[in-house]
Image (cartoon, helix red, strand yellow):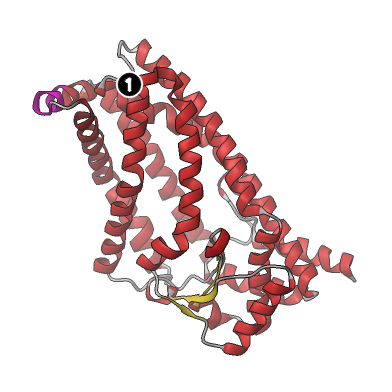
Amino acid sequence: MHAKQYQRVKLAATFTKSVLVWAAVVVFVALGGNEILADAVEARVASDYLAAASYVLVVWLALSALTFPLEFFVDFHLERRYGLSEQTFGRWFLDETKSVAIAVALFAPLAALWFHLLRTIDIYWFLPFGGVHFLFTVVLAQLAPTLLLPLFYDLSPLEDEGLRERLRRLAERHGLRVESISTIGMSKRTKKANAAFAGLGATKRLLVGDTLLEICDDDEIEAAAAHEIGHYKNGHIVKLLVIGGAAQFALFLALALLYDLAATRLGYAPTDLAAIPLFLVVAAPLFALLKPAMNALSRRFEYEADRFAARALRNSSALVSALKKISDRNLGDPSPHPFVEWYFYSHPSITKRARRVAKEAKWAS
């Protein structure tokens, strides 16, 4: 009941935030706020590109201020209320500030590119933008383990040499050479437990949360690591990049058509500053439609990684035990409503995963 209540409140607050942002932009346009802001920016900024950047920044800051109470409730208050975090407000706010700074640094160039392409090739901006965005995603996946993750978590070699060698042999047994097997210092921020396989090429790393080491024995840690290795052996990282890239390209095509249509219907040129909020208006429903399909793909990959781990170790009980401990520690809902799981969950419920692993054990016996 505790887990269900936590997940229900978190989901409701997160969903409310998304709807609030979309509704706020719609009201902003309906009341003419987009034109008032455009006139004010254009009167003060001579450069078209700087004016566009200023306009987007003001809108983004306004939306951030509007949703900050919900952000605080979901990411800080709720986590502390349910005993999942002991962060002070100051440390949480610092992390949020770093996240915002990184997002601006990473996505501002993409936004500038979008506006440039819109001005130069009009509705066909999605063609080069889709390619650049895909390359950007690949590079980010390559650099994230070495550049971004250490900004939030302390990374150190796994201290238990016996366990470290056990995990290394597991990886090498399946043809995988990892750059490092590291402990993530999650406990300074959260009590949630997790493990991950991160990076591409030479930056491949096996990451084990120190919170996971607290609750699992060596067999369970190995099972969790085997699951993460299963993602690599099944090509899930590359598949997600390729399938996600194709889906995003289709999304950009739909965005280009709908944005152009919305701007024209309301009497704007697509390059008008006042038209820019319409991009958010048409993007939100498209992302909402894409979400369940990508989550279904993610859940399928989780099942495949579980199957790999169960077959690789011939120890389904350790895998099930690890999955249950992680779910319990993270307050995962063991049996969410079918619609909620279908639409919102990127991972299957622990009940379904345990059932699948049990079937896999019967097959292997």
Q: Which residues are magenta?
A: 39-45
Name the residue rendered at 29%, 59% in the picture.
Answer: 98
Identify the residue at horizontal 22%, vertical 20% (top origin). Answer: 32
Which of the two residues, 363 or 56, is positioned nearer the viewer here? 56
When the figure is inspected, residue 138 is found, relative to residue 216, above or below; the finding is: above
Can residue 220 be seen?
Answer: no
For residue 365, side relative to residue 79 (left or right): right
Query: Quarter of the image holding residue 78?
Result: bottom left
Residue 201 percent location from the top left of the image: 57, 59
Residue 340, image x, y percentages: 58, 47
Q: Nearer the viewer, residue 195 or 334?
A: 195
Q: Residue at x 45, y 45 (%)?
A: 136
Prevalent SS, magenta region: helix
Tell me the residue at 37%/44% (across/down).
17
Mark count:
1
Q: Amino acid at mark 1?
A: Arg
Q: Position of residue 31 (x, y in %)?
A: 24, 21
Give the camera-side residue of 284 and 161. Answer: 161
User: On the image, numbered disc 1 is attached to which residue?
Assistant: 119
Residue 73 counted in the magenta span: no
* 35 relative to 251, above or below: above
Picture coordinates of residue 250 (x, y %)? 55, 29
Q: Quadrant of the C terminus?
A: bottom right
In the depicted structure, whether residue 324 falls above or below residue 114: below
